[in-house]
Image: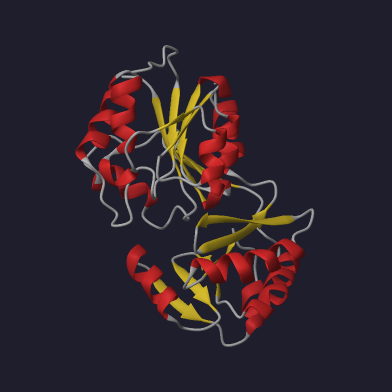
Amino acid sequence: MERVNKEYKVVVADIDRTLRDRNDQFGDINRKALQELHKRGVRLGLASGRPLWQRLLTHADEWGLGFQFDFIIGLNGGEIYDSRKNETVKLNPLQPESIKEIILGMAPAKCNPFIYREGYMLAQWDDELLRASAKRNNNDSNIVKDISEFWEEPVGKIMYRTYTVEEMDSVVVPLARTIENDVFFSFKTRVDLLEFQDRRNNKGNAVLEYCKANDISMDDVMAFGDAENDLEMMKMAGCSVCLCNGMPENKEIADYVTEYPAGEDGFGRWLFDHYL
């Protein structure tokens, strides 16, 4: 098998459908790979679309690693937690005027918008998709009494889920593209989930901020991902790896594609076969 000969100082990975499967299962091979990297002195990071408060800081314990990740990125680059410094930096949330423009602009799609507030989700109406998301992430959800509650304060991102891929691709995505501007943009993090956020925020820029603060070059970063919100991180890293269950766009720009999917420890297997 082809080997990666360069030694990297940082390994950062997306979580859902990269480190674990749709059933939130994290495998033993992934665990052993992270432990081996840690033993070699490699700095390890997580990069998620979820906010930090949504259990991101507890994954290391849940997965039995025996150590905390060196850094954790939340909200697709809107938050950066540096565990060595025990500091969190928050970057470029969507401002009320942009939130209002997105919510009203997307109204013709008749798709439920929801946002993260500290400790809970806020949506326009109750539906099965909201309940499933709240249950999956073990957090509360509230419904607005008036739509203006969405833009009462800045938020990291706005999300739209659909029941079918067809609804996402034929209705939600085309409408989203028409309201994008120089301040905010939209992207899919799953085939049935679209998100809006500030154009300055992405996982790649967040990794760059961490590296700058720790005197590390992006050439010394290896990044793993599967979806559109991982693209910039993968493009900016010195080495990028896409899970074989990833989106076509990610596979196209990746340096490598794993032989196994997230549900079969594709992350850990690839590292042991090609790097460790």
- The answer to which of 136 and 227 lies nearer the viewer is 227
Colour scheme: secondary structure
Q: Quadrant of the N terminus?
A: top left
Quarter that holds the C terminus: top left
In the image, residue 103 lies at what x, y percent?
67, 73
Report the residue at 62% width, 74% height from top: 150
Count all numbered tags in the image, as a single digit: 0
Quadrant in the rendering for residue 145: bottom right
The residue lying at 51 percent from left, 63 percent from top is: 193
The quarter holding residue 65 reads: top left
Decide if residue 128 is on the left or right side of residue 40: right
Q: Considering only vertical position in the picture, is 100 above or below 79?
A: below
In-front residue for pair 43/255: 255
Classify residue 218 as left or right of residue 46. right
Q: Is residue 28 visible?
A: yes
Q: In this rendering, is residue 39 above or below 153?
A: above
Quadrant in the picture for residue 28: top left
Q: Is residue 139 above or below residue 23?
A: below
Query: Residue drawn at (57%, 62%), measured in percent from left and top?
Result: 194
Left or right side of 143 for 21? left
Q: Residue 228, image x and y in percent? A: 56, 48
- The reply to whether residue 79 is in sight is no
x and y percent of residue 52 in the render? 45, 52
In the image, taking residue 19 as reference, residue 117 lies left or right, namely: right
Q: Residue furthest bottom?
A: 145
Give the farthest residue toward the top: 5
